[in-house]
Amino acid sequence: MTTALPKKVLVGPLVFDVAAVAGAKDWGLTDLQAGTITLRAGMTPEMQRWILAHEVMHAALFASGVMDDANDLTLTEEAWVARTSPLFADALQRSPGLAEFLAGAA
Ligand SMILES: [Zn+2]
């Protein structure tokens, strides 16, 4: 089964263009300023799903209003999950092909 990387991820009020780029330095990178999510090209489908989910979580955290305190270790696990889960669910619901891709059904 082929995997079709979603072209866009919608997270709350934000829109990210998604692309796989050969030779990218990082496995995945969410550029909040540019509105892009970049994955390194050439990963297995399983790794792509994992890395894209990771990057969408970064986008969800940012969309929740967390910016400068993103590395604030005083927040509880429950606080982080409470902030990100509504936006992660929003992204899955509104981003064409995202849920199917992450489920391995794309
Ligand atoms: Zn990360």
Image: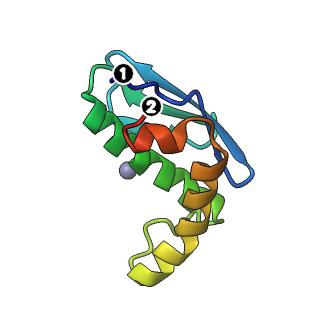
Q: Residue at x 44, y 83 (%)?
A: 78
Q: Residues within 10 Å of mark 2 (few under 14, many from 20)?
A: some
Camera-side residue: 13 or 97? 97
At x 66%, y 65%, the residue is 65
The residue tagged with tag 1: helix, strand or loop? loop
Q: Residues within 10 Å of mark 1 (few under 14, many from 20)?
A: few
Residue 56 place in picture, x, y as percent: 50, 48
Q: Is residue 51 above or below residue 38?
A: below
Which image quarter: residue 103? top left
Residues marked 1 and 2 touching at CB (< 8 Å):
yes
Please report whichever mark, 1 or 2, sits nearer to the chain's N-terminal start.
1
Dot 2 falls on a residue whose secondary structure is: loop
Q: Is residue 29 visible?
A: yes
The residue located at (55%, 51%) in the rendering is: 59
Q: Residue 26 vs residue 97: left or right?
A: left
Vertical relation: 56 (above or below) 82: above
Q: Mark 2: which amino acid?
A: Ala
Q: Amino acid at mark 1?
A: Thr
Disc 2 designates what residue? 106
Q: Is mark 2 within 8 Å of ligand 1?
A: no
- In the rendered image, residue 36, in percent from the top left (x then y), is placed at 57, 33
86 or 57: nearer the eye?
86
Figure quadrant of the N terminus: top left
Determine which quarter of the picture holds residue 15: top right
- Quadrant containing the C terminus is top left
Residue hosting label 1:
2
The image position of residue 69, as x and y in percent, is 52, 69
**23 to 35, vertically: above or below:** above
CA distance for labels 1 and 2: 7 Å
* Residue 74 visible somewhere in the drawing: no
Point out the residue furthest to the top here.
Answer: 22
Task: Count numbered badges in the picture.
Answer: 2
